[in-house]
Image: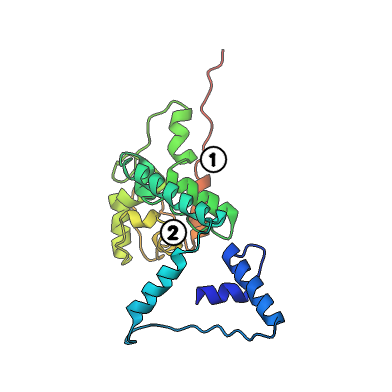
């Protein structure tokens, strides 16, 4: 079926073999030949199927053809991608390996600003995680359960207070699948019902987000309002 579709859709990137078939078909039609292409779904139950297949393979073995560049390019690309994946599988200590175990491409979000924010949250390159390094401060900890804030996704996923809120909301997906390429998981993870609260009386009010855009926007700008470190006057 794919071969017939290729012959019926001529374009500038058509396979070289298909070009030769169409050229031969044009010559035959100019000589008043009627050529009918027929697609047979399957050969199951047809007597002599193996003999027909062997005869077709034998006939094709006499044709010495050069490999088209497009076929060679696809073969090289698959081989290089396989070697790349094997090398990436050995880097188990890489923190990004947990977030992206395969090297296959991820779909992009329709809004680039949101896509950039999600990417920075995934890899942990945010002001939230690097501010203490820039200003020579200690690594921040969660005010409720005192865990080290490695990254915003990791903090929300590992925090006991956050887990309690997720369980009360009926959302138990606390594993690394929250960081994968499925946008639905991130939206479901960020949305917390307004009737669920996880703060103590002495804690500041807990922000509740009704959309992924609001949560990501607040996460990326939460530290920008912090006052700069005081400088000693000479």
Left/right of residue 97 with respect to residue 112 in the rendered view: left
- Label 1: how many Cα within 10 Å (few below 14, some 14–19, many 20+): few
Q: Position of residue 175 (x, y in %)?
A: 30, 55
Q: Position of residue 150 (x, y in %)?
A: 36, 40
The residue that label 2 is drawn on is 208
Residue found at the very far front of the displayed protein: 62
Residue drawn at x 66%, y 71% as measured from the top left: 23
Q: Quadrant of residue 128?
A: top left
Residue 155 visible, this angle = no
Residue drawn at x 37%, y 73% as measured from the top left: 54
Residue 224 numbered tag = 1
* Mark 1 vs 2: CB contact within 8 A: no
Residue found at the very far top of the displayed protein: 234
Task: Decide which of 111, 92 is in the foreground and name it.
Answer: 92
Residue drawn at x 39%, y 60% as measured from the top left: 189
Residue 68 visible, this angle = yes
Residue found at the very far right of the displayed protein: 30
Q: Position of residue 161 (x, y in %)?
A: 30, 52
3 vs 12: above or below: below
């Amino acid at each position: 079926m794919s071969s017939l579709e290729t012959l019926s859709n001529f374009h500038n990137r058509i396979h070289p073999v298909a070009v030769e078939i169409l050229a031969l078909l044009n010559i035959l039609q100019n000589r008043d030949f009627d050529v009918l292409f027929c697609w047979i779904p399957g050969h199951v139950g047809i007597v002599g199927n193996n003999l027909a297949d062997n005869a077709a393979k034998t006939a094709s073995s006499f044709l010495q053809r050069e490999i088209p560049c497009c076929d060679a390019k696809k073969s090289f690309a698959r081989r290089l991608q396989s070697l790349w994946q094997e090398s990436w599988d050995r880097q188990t200590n890489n923190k990004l390996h947990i977030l992206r175990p395969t090297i296959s491409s991820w779909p992009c979000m329709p809004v680039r600003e949101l896509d950039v924010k999600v990417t920075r949250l995934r890899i942990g390159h945010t002001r939230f995680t690097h501010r203490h390094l820039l200003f020579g401060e200690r690594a921040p900890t969660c005010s409720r359960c005192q865990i080290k804030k490695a990254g915003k996704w990791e903090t929300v996923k590992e925090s006991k207070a956050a887990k309690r809120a997720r369980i009360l909301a009926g959302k138990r997906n606390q594993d690394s699948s929250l960081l994968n390429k499925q946008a639905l998981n991130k939206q479901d993870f960020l949305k917390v019902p307004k009737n669920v609260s996880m703060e103590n009386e002495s804690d500041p009010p807990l922000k509740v987000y009704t959309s992924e855009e609001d949560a990501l926007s607040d996460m990326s700008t939460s530290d920008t309002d912090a006052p700069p470190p005081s400088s000693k006057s000479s």
